[in-house]
Amino acid sequence: MPAPQIRICLKTRDRGFISKLLKPAPKLLCTLSDDIGRTTAPIAIATDNQEVLKTEDTERLTSNISEIMVSLPAGWWSWCRPEVYLVMVVVVYGQTSRCFPFHCAVSEEGTTSKYRAVLPQNERERDRQSREERIHAARKIYQRSEESNGERSVPARVAKLPAAEGFSVKYLTLLFPHVVVGQLQRLFVSSVGYIKRLFSKYRKFDTLKDLYDGPVPDTTCCKPSTPFYTPRASLYWDTDEWFGLQRLIGVDPTIIRLCPPVDDTKPEADDLEKLLFRSRSRVEEHHLDGMTVAAALTEKRLFVCDLTFMKDFSRGPRGPAVPAPIALFFWNDDGDLLPVAIMLYNLAESNHHETTTHLMLTHLLMESFCLATHRHLDVSHPVFRLLWPHFHFLMAINAILNIGIEKGLELGRARLREWRIDVEGTLPAALEERGLADPTILKDKYLYRDDAMKLYNVLKKYATAYISYYYHDESMISSDPEIQDWATTLATHYDIKGVPNDGQLKTRDELILMVTCIIYTCSVGHASVNFAQYDQYGYPPNYPGCLKGRPSSDPYEHPEEEDAFMALASRGNMLHIMAITHLLSQRGDRRLAGGFAAFIVDQSDEIRACIKELKHGLRQIREEIKRRNTEYARQDPFHMMLYDYLDPSKIPNSIGI
């Protein structure tokens, strides 16, 4: 019986039509090896094309192809050929296929990829040197940046974006239409709005409808018919019920916490206690359903959002002032979270969200983990292959972010110095620290917590099965030099707090905690603070990113609607914020758990089972969210409670936007 055909396909980073025309990619030389050491002669294969092996090569190999070496052919024309970034090689043998990840530039010396991930202590003696050489080569490419004063950047960031980390042409073509539409919409509405203002006598919030090119969509679960649809929040932005819900299902749902016990006997009260003591009688009379403050605290029905730490990071005298407020909320008998004592709040939270929760604690923080992974783990390391899908385009999007004023970074860095991977980076511990781990607290309204916890548990179960497959016992953790270097670097050089034993990992649970944090933050965590941006910021009165002037210090002043309207940003700034948040709310092309087989390529029964179980768990969560949103839509004509930002089918694998 003749041996089945072996087909090989080289998948490279796409370079675009012009680049391909000016510098055509050369053929690559591939040498295949099987499990018993038999190899083929070098085979020239064109990139992104399939090549069928000759009969003599097929007969020399078994079906268990275990290793592939790829190199560039030597030649005098090498100075003018383009760099070829090889993503993976796919080998199809009969009815089976195997993926060999490379994720590197190909050289004349050649680079090797194994089908199965290998721990460094289990590497064959003859392959250890090449493994170390790959890590040293990666460290030259992934160098840590320095600040202008010569000190290392905090958080740790890559000095120069590696070519391998850039956006693909395919991805750019997905984003480009949104950028163009945003700018054209901004230009058109600015022109029309200017003409209308010439003849406008009154300035009210109703006039903001001119900013949009479509009505409020029927439900947030359906794709809007126009790019700049009217955000649903425009229907109820000025209600107390929505103001409370914004703390639970908005873009920054990690600030709210259970109000701690207060002591009115101590001589020095903090801001929360001052707020309660100053307004206790008024709060008890009008807002607590007949309860006293003490009773509400005992029954865990008072909640607080405290942003008073922002007073040290308000912008300078030339820029607009950002408040540093505190807000108190009560969980009433009807199951609504209502404000009982607030200051000018949403402006402060929106600034905290963009600079800290979104930019610093997802984008920039995760780049530190990405940098450490590339510098200390070989591409054949199981943890590298586990994490790589979640770092897709992370460095690229960070490289083009408009970071903003230094004061904003100072606020984010201050919060980062307090961030711990075993507390804020571990969702159950973070909820426990804020007093919100009990699902009966804020029941059926804190949808971020409910959805995020389900997803966290599924991801942790997946990470546990994966890590346990490669690390059969605890001793394998301590004897893995690459994972020890990785964790130690994060703890000591990258200033990540809460790394177990200051980076000297001893147990599988410690490693599972770290990789679960990374996977969760790059997918679920980022989705929860990113994809609701247009729905929140898109209607400026609902969640203003900036206001004109300075807030009044008179607590008894009640501004008229026109006064509040005049405090909003200019129409041009509104459109700028709309265009940016519309772009940022677009999702990437790789969904959570999609395409894992292309990266976690060791398709043993155990690995296949854990990927299958992960996808099954995500499908169940998706159906639960869909049923819940359908039920809420029946009960509420305004669809105020619809929350689908953590629908697994809409969560990208990585921070790519």
Image (tube, rainbow, N blue to C red):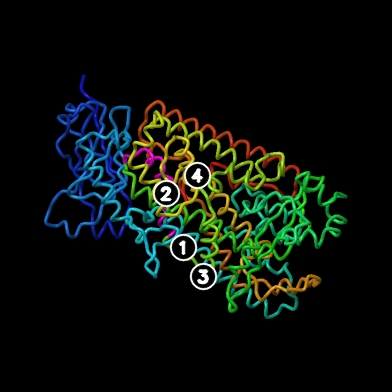
Q: Locate residue 235, reporting x and y percent.
A: 73, 57
Disc 2 from disc 1: Cα separation: 16 Å
Residue occupying the point 71% across, 66% down:
344
Q: Locate residue 124, reporting x and y percent.
A: 23, 33
Instruction: Confirm whether residue 408 shows in the render.
Output: yes
Q: Which residue is mark 4?
A: 517
Residue occupying the point 24% across, 31% down:
6
Q: Which residue is mark 2?
A: 391
Kind of residue sitting beneath label 3: Ile
Q: Nearer the viewer, mark 4 or mark 1?
A: 4
Residue occupying the point 17% across, 27% down:
60
Write the start and end of the magenta stretch as one range: 380-398
Q: Secondary structure at mark 4?
A: helix
Question: Which badge, 3 or 4, is on the more N-terminal residue?
Answer: 3
Q: Which residue is mark 1?
A: 401
Q: Main secondary structure of the magenta part?
A: helix
Mark 3 neighbour class, 10 Å CA radius: few under 14, some 14 to 19, many 20 or more: few
Kind of residue sitting beneath label 1: Leu
Disc 3 from disc 2: Cα separation: 26 Å
Disc 4 from disc 1: Cα separation: 23 Å
